Structures are given as C-alpha cells and as structure tokens.
C-alpha cells in the first residue's frame, strides 16, 4: 500500500492558530519576539546582511542564495543573485515556492498542520535561513543544512519545528533551512520535450538545493560555520532529497554527512515516463510540445491548476527527480548505493507508526476480523493464510500490542520502513562509511495518545525544540529529556560522523549481519535487528 491510500481530504483546519498557544519562545522562534533587536551584520558574496539577535543566537531569515526564478528564469537552472550595495535586513522568512494548498492542508494530521506558517508565496523563493551562536571566521562550528518535507510539491523551510534557534543555542552549531522550487516549478521535466532551450531544464528543484549548498560553502564561515563540516538532513520528502543529493555529481564535495528521517529515495523517474507526463500536462493546458515557451507566460495559479493528481510520487503527474543521465546519472539507491557518496556517513531511520500522520486513519479499537481485512488490503496479493501468518508473527514480536497497534505498525512497515531499511542495507554493503540506524518508538500523548509515533514526530526532538511543538509532543517532561538525547546524537553525528554520546548507550554502526539499531524512546537501547523477522516476512508476502 502506498502513501496516498492513507490520505483523506475530509479533515480540515479553520486557521493556522487553532489550538496553538503562542508563547514567548514560540514567538522568538518565528521572529516575532518583541525583544529581538537588530543583530550582527555579515558580508556575503552578494552583499551585506543584518540579522536579529534573539534568544541568545543570531538569526538571519530570508537570505537570498540565487536569483528570482520568475520570467525567463522559470524552469531554468538557478543563476547567481545580482549583488546589492546597501545592508539588507533579513529579519523575516522569505517567500516560499508557489504550491497548491490541497497538497498540504487536509492531507496531514492537524497536529502537524498547525506547524505551518503559510508564508507568502512567489517565484523569488530561493532563500535560506541561518541560526548561529555568533558570527565571524574565528569559529569552525558544524553546519547542519535542513531540507524540508512535503514530498517534492509542498512545504518550506519556515515550519515552526524547523527553527534552528535551540540547536544553535544549546549545541553550538550553525543551522540552515532552505527554500527551493517545488511542484511544476522545480520538477517539470522539459529537457526531453521542450527543445534545445530547455536542454538543461531537469531537476531544477534539486539544482536549487545544490546552489544553496554552494552558498554555504562560500559564505558560512562568515556566520561562524565550518564549510568543511556540513551535514545535510531532512525528513520525509526532505529525506528523499538528501538521498537524491547523495547520487548527484553537482552536489559532490558540498556535504560531508547525511541524515535521512523517514524518507528514502531508492529510484528516480525515467526520462521516458517523465516526458510522457510532461506531454500530458501541456495537453491539459491546451499546449503542444513545441509550445513549451508559453508556459513562461502563464500565471503561477494557471500552472498549478494544471497539475494532474496528488502530491506524492506515483499519485499522478511525475513531479520528482528524474534519472536524466547528467544531474542524476543513476537511480539513487537502486540496485546499489551510489559510489559518488560512498565515503559519506549516513544516519537513517523511521518512526513506529508513520501512517498516523495522515487523516482518516483507524485510531480506535478494531476486532480480529477487521484487522485481517485491513492487513489483506495492505498486502494486496497475499491470501488469507499468508495474512494470518504475518499478523501472528507481529503479535508474537509485540505481545502487548492491540489490534489497532498492529495494523498501524504493519502499515508503516509496508510503506515507509521498507525503503529506509533497504537504503541502509545497500549503504552498509559498500562498507566504505558507517551507517547508523534508529527506530523512533516514543508515543506522543496528544489526541489521547492515539497518534502514537506518527510521521514527523521525530523532527522537534532532532531540533531540540519540543517546547514550541506542543501540538505534536504535548508538554510533559519526558519529551524534553528525550529531545536532549536525540538532538545531541544528531549534533554528535554532524560533528564527527558518529552519533554516540554519553546520554545514550554506545551506538554501533548498522551492518547486514548484526543490524544494530538504536531504539529512541523513554528508555533508549541498542538492539540487533529489532522486529526484523516479522518485517522480512511482511515484505516476502
């Protein structure tokens, strides 16, 4: 069963602020704290920027890293920003890429939806945000570059839990979050159908991210970061982007560690499939292949209105990285891990009940017959005896789990965990850089605990900012304790390539024999091949 089968459009939220108490810390994280004052001025390659001094860190929001993508730049690879002469005040989040509201609102749980700020949209969207304890070239702090989720069609670097303030303040690192082109603007494949003009119009959303990493290489030292110690990390679609970058020659040398949270990318789209999809899109707009130039004259709303299908890969129009032979020469992790990034350490994992992130999920008790029916839908081709065998294996491995627990865990294993584990296996098979695997099983108390360990729940723990993400995490002390452990592991990995620290058991690398995996919960423990037998049975069904 793929992700889109879990999505229902029946749940909506009236306003962004519904259920959110805007505390002082939250306001600070969003740049709205009245106590924030103009902070340091930093010289970049395009001109000087002045940030805000807030919460013990210097925050720079909406810093341009490339030119606007409007007009003649639409669908083209990113180009350099023209320098400015005055000091540019970068106090507020920049524009996010134009996107359809339906690709986010109503497609995810309200616990996550309230984390979206719905910033203004526009094609001048190639900007990033930086948080640093202090500026100046005398520091060489690890740099952590976050790539947001939302597949390849929605989201931004400005979501509430993506604030880098606490990571910078508590852990002495520099945090960067990135906006880039999405949907039609970032992933419409014109190279195979639009003629010579569009010969390089492939994977431009990914090339935007490469441009942001080049900006980091050229500028981050002035913000107190070490350009020789850059970690890319992301969740869901952001994890997919991290995986794709590991196979992209233009990105080689721009990062040194990689963290993938619930978002493997084993394969990309083929040129033939992508070209066919683009042709269908043009036809929907009443255009022929030789009229691709007219796309540059349409409004953003007109372009988005023509999108076919849903927000996730495989749900309709091909809006995802394409194996074009140049920017992405091969499938990222199929049939093997990319040799291009063989020496890059990888930290990778999932949450236990990823699918409770999507509305319309079964969260209340179900009986044995309903469990069997639902698992048969998940497995599709399995007969009744095989379904019963899978359920029995999972029940044996989790004797205290309810029927609802089993359904949600099996569904999550079949959709999210399978790709992540396979990516870890293929990376470990190279034996050229360590792989560390985690399994996040902490259960949120929100929604009477029914959301369990949902997709994206690990984000505020990685950013050590659970206090501004209480609609997701609740407000109990357990969350803050675990956040300290998880964020310290992420920072240790960014600093050294090894996530071990004194707050956790010794974290051994994952290999295909012992399969060591860190369970992240109120009690963190390293377990060899946790629940591996039933997962392998599931994937053979």
Image (spheres, rainbow, N blue to C red):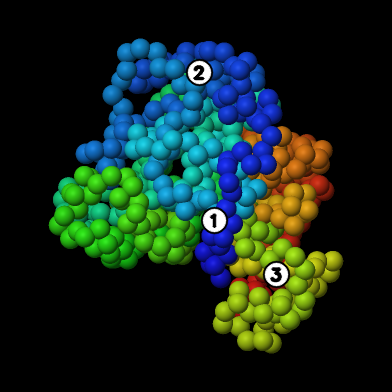
Q: Residue at x 28, y 24 (%)?
A: 82
Q: Quadrant of residue 316?
A: bottom left
Residue 212 location (% of width, % of height): 41, 34
Task: Give the spatial CA distance, label 3 vs label 2.
Answer: 48 Å
Bin the neighbour count of mark 3 within 10 Å (Cα to Cα): few under 14, some 14-19, many 20 and up: many
> In front here: 89 or 347?
89
Residue 208 location (% of width, % of height): 37, 40
Secondary element under disc 1, as helix, strand or loop, is loop
Residue placed furthest toward the front: 14
Bin the neighbour count of mark 2 within 10 Å (Cα to Cα): few under 14, some 14-19, many 20 and up: many
Of the residues under marks 2 and 1, which one precedes in the sequence?
A: 2
Task: Give the spatial CA distance, label 2 vs label 1.
Answer: 34 Å
Residue under pointer 2: 51
Residue 188 location (% of width, % of height): 32, 53
Q: Is residue 393 left or right of residue 13?
A: right
Task: Give the spatial CA distance, label 1 vs label 3.
Answer: 20 Å
Is any part of residue 523 visible from this angle? yes
Of the residues under marks 1 and 3, which one precedes in the sequence?
A: 1
Q: Which mark is residue 107?
A: 1
Q: Which mark is residue 407?
A: 3
Q: Residue at x 42, y 50 (%)?
A: 100
Between disc 1 and disc 3, the foreground one is 1
Q: Residue at x 55, y 30 (%)?
A: 175
Picture layout, residue 363 above or below residue 541: above
Q: Residue at x 58, y 29 (%)?
A: 30
């Amino acid at each position: 069963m793929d992700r889109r089968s879990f999505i229902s459009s029946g749940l909506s939220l009236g306003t962004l602020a519904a259920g959110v108490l805007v505390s002082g810390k939250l306001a600070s994280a969003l740049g709205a704290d009245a106590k924030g004052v103009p902070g340091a001025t930093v010289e970049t390659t395009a001109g000087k920027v002045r940030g805000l001094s807030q919460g013990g860190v210097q925050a720079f929001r909406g810093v341009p890293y490339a030119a606007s993508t409007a007009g003649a730049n639409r669908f083209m690879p990113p180009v350099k920003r023209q320098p400015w002469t005055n000091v540019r005040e970068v106090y507020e989040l920049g524009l996010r890429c134009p996107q359809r509201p339906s690709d986010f609102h109503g497609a995810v749980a309200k616990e996550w939806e309230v984390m979206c700020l719905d910033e203004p949209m526009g094609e001048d969207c190639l900007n990033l945000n930086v948080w640093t304890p202090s500026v100046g070239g005398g520091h060489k702090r690890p740099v952590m570059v976050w790539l947001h989720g939302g597949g390849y069609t929605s989201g931004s670097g400005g979501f509430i839990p993506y604030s880098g303030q606490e990571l910078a303040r508590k852990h002495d690192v520099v945090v960067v979050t990135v906006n880039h082109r999405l949907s039609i603007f970032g992933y419409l494949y014109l190279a195979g159908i639009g003629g010579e003009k569009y010969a390089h119009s492939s994977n431009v959303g990914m090339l935007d991210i490469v441009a942001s990493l080049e900006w980091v290489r050229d500028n981050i030292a002035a913000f107190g970061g070490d350009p020789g110690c850059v970690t890319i990390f992301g969740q869901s679609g952001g994890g997919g982007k991290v995986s794709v970058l590991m196979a992209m020659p233009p990105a080689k040398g721009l990062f040194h560690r990689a963290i993938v949270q619930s978002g493997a990318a084993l394969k990309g789209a083929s040129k033939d499939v992508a070209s066919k999809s683009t042709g269908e899109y043009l036809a929907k707009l009443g255009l022929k292949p030789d009229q691709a130039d007219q796309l540059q004259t349409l409004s953003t709303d007109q372009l988005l209105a023509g999108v076919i299908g849903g927000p996730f890969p495989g749900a309709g129009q091909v809006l995802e990285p394409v194996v074009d032979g140049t920017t992405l020469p091969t499938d990222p992790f199929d049939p093997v891990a990319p040799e291009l990034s063989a020496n890059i350490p990888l930290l990778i994992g999932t949450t236990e009940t990823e699918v409770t992130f999507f509305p319309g999920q079964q969260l209340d008790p179900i009986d044995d017959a309903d469990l069997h029916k639902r698992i048969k839908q998940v497995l599709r081709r399995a007969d009744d005896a095989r379904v019963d065998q899978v359920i029995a294996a999972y029940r044996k491995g989790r004797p205290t789990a309810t029927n609802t627990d089993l359904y949600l865990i099996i569904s999550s294993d079949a959709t999210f965990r399978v790709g992540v584990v396979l990516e870890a296996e293929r990376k470990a098979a190279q034996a050229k850089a360590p792989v560390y695997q985690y399994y996040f099983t902490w259960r949120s108390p929100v929604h009477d605990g029914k959301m369990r360990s949902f997709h994206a729940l690990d984000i505020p723990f990685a950013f050590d900012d659970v206090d501004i993400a209480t609609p997701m995490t609740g407000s109990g002390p357990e969350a803050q304790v675990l956040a300290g452990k998880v964020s310290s592991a992420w920072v240790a990995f960014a600093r050294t390539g090894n996530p071990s620290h004194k707050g956790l058991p010794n974290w051994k690398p994952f290999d295909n024999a012992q399969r060591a995996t860190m369970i992240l919960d109120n009690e963190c423990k390293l377990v060899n091949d946790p629940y591996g037998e039933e997962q392998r049975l599931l994937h053979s069904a």
